[in-house]
């Protein structure tokens, strides 16, 4: 990923996450300034979100903390996140199908065990049962 691409993704994800948090650029800049002991004015936030101002590493870390997200979230394109989400959802569906099959297998085994236990009890009492396929 080139530096400019990383910057564009960071700017876009920052804006998305800030808006998701319900913070204006003014409020976000105020809170970020407090975390950094440095002044980040709202116009700096505008430039950052437009990709016209680079972000220092300590600013990026503070931004992630303020938004309560992992720094990687701000560096990952949403289309990448969407692809991962799609993969995980597909895996979840397959896991649910395997779980259902396992439940069905358990029910069948429980039934077989009950039938065999019944046959054993009947045999112990001298009762002969017809052959039943289990």
Image: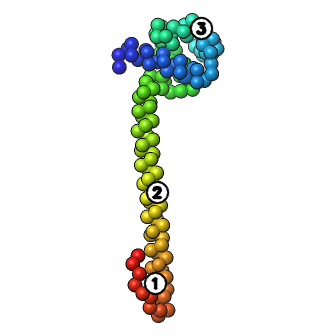
Q: Is mark 3 on a helix, strand or loop?
A: helix
First in sequence: mark 3 or mark 1? 3
Q: In which quarter of the image is residue 84?
A: top left
Q: Position of residue 17 (x, y in %)?
A: 55, 23
Q: Please say if the residues under marks 1 and 2 sit with CB atoms less than 8 Å apart.
A: no
**Residue wearing tag 2:** 100
- Does 107 sit above or below residue 98? below
- Residue at left offset 44%, top offset 19%: 9
Relative horizontal placement of residue 3, taking residue 59 as reference (left or right):
left
Relative horizontal placement of residue 121, taking residue 2 as reference (left or right):
right
Q: Report whether residue 1 is seen.
A: yes
Q: Point out the frontmost of discs 2 and 3.
A: 2
Looking at the rendering, in which quadrant would you find the N terminus?
A: top left
**Mark 1: few, some, or many residues within 10 Å (few <14, many ≥20)?**
some
Q: What element carries label 2?
A: helix
- Residue at left offset 44%, top offset 22%: 75
Tell me, for residue 42, which label it has, or none: 3
First in sequence: mark 1 or mark 2? 2
The Cα atoms of the two marked residues, 1 and 2, are separated by 29 Å
Q: Position of residue 113 (x, y in %)?
A: 46, 75
First in sequence: mark 2 or mark 3? 3
Q: Please say if the residues under marks 3 and 1 sit with CB atoms less than 8 Å apart.
A: no
Q: Position of residue 68 (x, y in %)?
A: 57, 26
Q: Where is residue 77 in the image (x, y as percent from the top left)?
A: 43, 24
**Mark 3: few, some, or many residues within 10 Å (few <14, many ≥20)?**
some
- Does 11 sit above or below residue 122? above
**Residue wearing tag 1:** 119
């Amino acid at each position: 990923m080139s530096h400019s691409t990383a910057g564009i993704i960071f700017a876009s994800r920052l804006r998305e996450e800030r808006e998701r948090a319900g913070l204006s650029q003014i409020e976000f800049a105020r809170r970020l300034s407090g975390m950094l002991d440095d002044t980040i004015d709202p116009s700096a936030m505008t430039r950052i979100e437009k990709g016209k101002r680079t972000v220092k590493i300590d600013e990026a870390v503070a931004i992630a903390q303020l938004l309560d997200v992992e720094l990687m979230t701000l560096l990952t394109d949403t289309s990448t996140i969407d692809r991962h989400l799609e993969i995980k959802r597909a895996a979840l569906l397959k896991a649910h199908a395997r779980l259902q099959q396992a439940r069905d297998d358990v029910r069948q085994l429980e039934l077989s065990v009950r039938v065999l236990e019944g046959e054993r009890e009947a045999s112990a009492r001298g009762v002969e049962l017809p052959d039943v396929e289990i």
